[in-house]
Amino acid sequence: MEFMNVVRMQIKPGKLEEWRAVMAENFKAAAAMGGVPGMIEIRHVQFGEDKVCVVGRWESQEAFAAARPMLVQNLDRFRHLLVPGPAGDTDPIAGKVIFSTA
């Protein structure tokens, strides 16, 4: 069953372009390894001046769980660019897809 993860984060003022560059490097490295197993797609949605929501679409919850160590490793590459919030550096949620128009 398809699975989604959504991670909300706030980028430090003036650091959005640096964050985008790190994300591009992360995905370039992943592409060089043949992609991220189980990941169908990922989207970055900017809302507001410095807030971003990363939305990932996965083949299954198991695929997402298997990728989690790599995702945390990627996060560690740009964690210094984030504004810590009440829940930490990011505000993640995840769950199975129960309806889709795709």
Image (cartoon, rainbow, N blue to C red):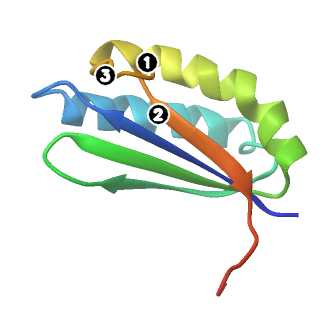
Pinpoint residue 34: horizontal percent, then vertical percent. 75, 43
Q: Secondary structure at mark 2?
A: strand
Which amino acid type is marked by label 3? Answer: Leu
In depth, the one of 58 and 33 nearer the eye is: 58
Which residue corresponds to mark 1? 88
Residue toward you, 14 or 22? 14
Q: Is residue 23 left or right of residue 32?
A: left
Q: Quadrant of residue 70?
A: top right
64 vs 16, left or right, is right
Disc 2 packing (10 Å; few <14; some 14–19; many ≥20): some
Label 2 sits on residue = 91
Q: CA distance from mark 2 to mark 1?
A: 7 Å
Please tell me whether mark 3 sits on a helix, a strand or a loop.
loop
**Disc 3: which residue:** 82
Residue under the point 25% across and 28% down: 18
Which type of secondary structure does the marked residue at label 1 adopt? loop
Amino acid on which disc 2 is placed:
Asp
Q: Residue at x 73, y 21 (%)?
A: 69
Location of residue 18 with respect to 55 vertically, above or below: above
Q: Nearer the viewer, residue 36 or 88?
A: 88
**Mark 3 or mark 1, which has the lower sequence index?**
3
Q: Position of residue 29 (x, y in %)?
A: 59, 32
Which of the 4 quarters of the picture holds residue 72?
Answer: top right
How many C-alpha atoms fall within 10 Å of the one at disc 1: few (<14), some, or many (≥20)? few
In x, y percent, where is residue 15? 18, 27
